Amino acid sequence: MTSILSSSPSTFLPSFTSHSYLHPKPLFHSHHHHLNLTTQQHFTPLRVNSTLSMDKEIPQSQRPLTFLKQSESDSSSTIRARFEKMIRETQDSVCNAIESTDGGAKFKEDVWSRPGGGGGISRVLQNGAVWEKAGVNVSVVYGLMPPDAYRAANPSSSSSSPPSPVPFFAAGISSVLHPKNPFAPTMHFNYRYFETDAPKDAPGAPRQWWFGGGTDLTPAYIFEEDVKHFHQTQKSACDKFDPSFYPRFKKWCDDYFYIKHRDERRGLGGIFFDDLNDYDQELLLSFSTECANSVIPAYIPIIEKRKDLPFTDEHKAWQQLRRGRYVEFNLVYDRGTTFGLKTGGRIESILVSLPLTSRWEYDHKPEEGSEEWKLLDACINPKEWV
Amino acid sequence: MTSILSSSPSTFLPSFTSHSYLHPKPLFHSHHHHLNLTTQQHFTPLRVNSTLSMDKEIPQSQRPLTFLKQSESDSSSTIRARFEKMIRETQDSVCNAIESTDGGAKFKEDVWSRPGGGGGISRVLQNGAVWEKAGVNVSVVYGLMPPDAYRAANPSSSSSSPPSPVPFFAAGISSVLHPKNPFAPTMHFNYRYFETDAPKDAPGAPRQWWFGGGTDLTPAYIFEEDVKHFHQTQKSACDKFDPSFYPRFKKWCDDYFYIKHRDERRGLGGIFFDDLNDYDQELLLSFSTECANSVIPAYIPIIEKRKDLPFTDEHKAWQQLRRGRYVEFNLVYDRGTTFGLKTGGRIESILVSLPLTSRWEYDHKPEEGSEEWKLLDACINPKEWV
């Protein structure tokens, strides 16, 4: 089997403020546009666009123990090594929990590496008994960042960009889980860590680092006990670290997942934070770990309660309409998705966040007081759930 | 029945190079965000965002004979009056043809006006026997354009913007027709005309005007005779005016409906042109009229042949995947849609272009040589059909 590979533009993540993409770091790798051709006869080669192209991802037959350089993985106490360990353990535990709850379907795994440094593991479960589409991706990438990108990613640095490339490191886990049953909510989470080293010609400059992430719930119908349980789990994780975290990150989440042209949010929120570096680095690593560990207890009990509820075609149609909103948010507003699309990240990894199916009806308005109306009302007017 | 209205940001179309939106001119009107509440008790008022808001659309109970000012409609020989007459006749004839072919479903009509001048007629047929969603919209709007917008819309003017607002006029028809049967293609067309007058303080400046538009076909499966018939009809319309039109506008269409992140086109093209003013104004009005008159003979015979073909769930799933691409193009790239979403055009009119249902499968690749593969190949490598 021969593949025709088309390198598409791939460029630098100009700011690490992007997020929520399923493929946590669409950095430096191109997507492979292959039609699985067995011959290349009578086939015009696909367009090759090398503008901004920096590096191509390479499929791997098996996952490595670590994506870090040998020298770094030896010192397992670094934040980099501990963050990679955390996201890979989270990927394993979330995938195991999903498979176990789904009761049959298995994740398909794609492992890739990038010559510039690092790689990733994409896992997708499609058309299961409980989930119609579930993606859980990790990536760990590093290399040299062009001076302009460094400046864009680090606006607080001096206004002149460094004259030479800046070493960077980026790692993250990202996941979107879309169940079939309209009473079982979609959930998304994403946790990431970013570092830059001193430019080579300015060895005295400090290492920069940021944490970001969040976990949010998108139901089509509100079961108040479910939403409270979800938010309470996020709050409990936050409260172990700082009483200001939950209110601050809850609001940040409501603000981020805003579909401006609808004046409504994608769902019922959760927590979201970005570019965090004004706390102790150890504290933020622990906090990210706590958040990641809260994903399963926040979500799986809800799915267990709702996955087998009977539903009508009307319930399903409403879920599909809300899935349409999910598509609108991700394609129009989500910074990671829009950045990935523009710069040639691996398209299938980026768009695995989209639901299997969705729906748009002209001028649909739920009847006041209906369950559909209550959901829409809560998306328009975010509520305090705990 | 009380509606809660939320004015959302509405601003100026900075350039008349946007197009292909179903609501031809999302200018100067805000969308009405109403939940059809019968009471306003216990309901937090929706967020009001007045930034850039310029003008609100007002629903009308019946359509006027003309959206033009009295003084202008009297002189029915102006290009404005004749263009409005043409697009409204086209709306009627296309809607009649769709209803007649559908055999039962009727268009729902929404008429609106804007206080600043003009208005529009949106017509949508949903869940018919043949079409799952069909929208045919016209709008005719005019008023005063802020100096900055004039400069943006007219970059060839002197580099200093006029010191006072510029009178403008914009009219267009736009339509997207999504059939149910996976062998029956989606079609889109859009024709528009734009004028600016001399700024009030520069009465000697020439009146500026542009024509734009196009008609394109998006099948899920290729019937070569259908695609040839469609393109031949476009070519025949073009050839009546200039032999360079079809090759030029065919390529423009392939270039415009390009989904960059997939390196493929939305469909199999047709014709597309924009900002045309380097021909005689009468010629371009006649050409636009000829193109609009070609919509029914280009499309309806194809639908008649394909609307009742038997199909499998697999055929339907492939159509749905292609509908997903339609959504990706419209939400990510289509200039009219993205502009309308950003600036608060009437959302339901803008997004009526989206299909009723769509689908995204992870890493779907059609088998080489299959009918699905042939369609994808033609979207990746545009072909000459006539």
Image (cartoon, coloured by chain):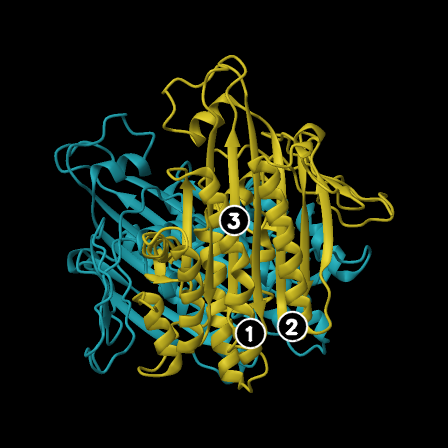
Chain colours: A cyan, B yellow
Cβ atoms at labels 2 and 3 below 8 Å apart: no
The CA distance from mark 1 to mark 3 is 22 Å
* Residue A339 placement (x, y as % from top left): 38, 49
* Residue B339 placement (x, y as % from top left): 50, 42
The CA distance from mark 2 to mark 3 is 23 Å
What chain does badge 1 belong to?
A: B
Residue drawn where x is 15% and y is 56% of the image: A71
Amino acid at circle 3: Tyr
Residue drawn where x is 54% and y is 32% of the image: B12
Considering every residue shown, the one lying at the far top of the view is B201
Mark 1 lies on residue: B303
Q: Can residue A20 be seen here? A: yes
Q: Residue A277's quadrant in the figure?
A: top left
Secondary structure category for the residue under label 1: helix
Considering every residue shown, the one lying at the far left of the view is A201
Q: Residues within 10 Å of mark 2 (few under 14, many from 20)?
A: some
What chain does badge 3 belong to?
A: B
Cβ atoms at labels 1 and 2 below 8 Å apart: yes
Q: Residue B268's quadrant in the figure?
A: bottom left
Identify which residue, B305 or B374, lies in the foreground.
Answer: B305
Amino acid at circle 1: Ile
* Residue B168 placement (x, y as % from top left): 55, 29
Mark 2 or 3, nearer chain start: 2
What chain does badge 2 belong to?
A: B
Mark 2 lies on residue: B101
Q: Can residue A229 be seen here? A: no
Mark 3 lies on residue: B191
Give the left or right position of residue A176, taking residue A111 as reference.
Answer: right
Q: Looking at the picture, do discs 2 and 3 lie on one chain?
A: yes
When the figure is inspected, residue B152 is found, relative to residue A136, above or below; the finding is above
Give the left or right position of residue B231, taking residue B133 as reference.
Answer: left
Q: Residues within 10 Å of mark 1 (few under 14, many from 20)?
A: many
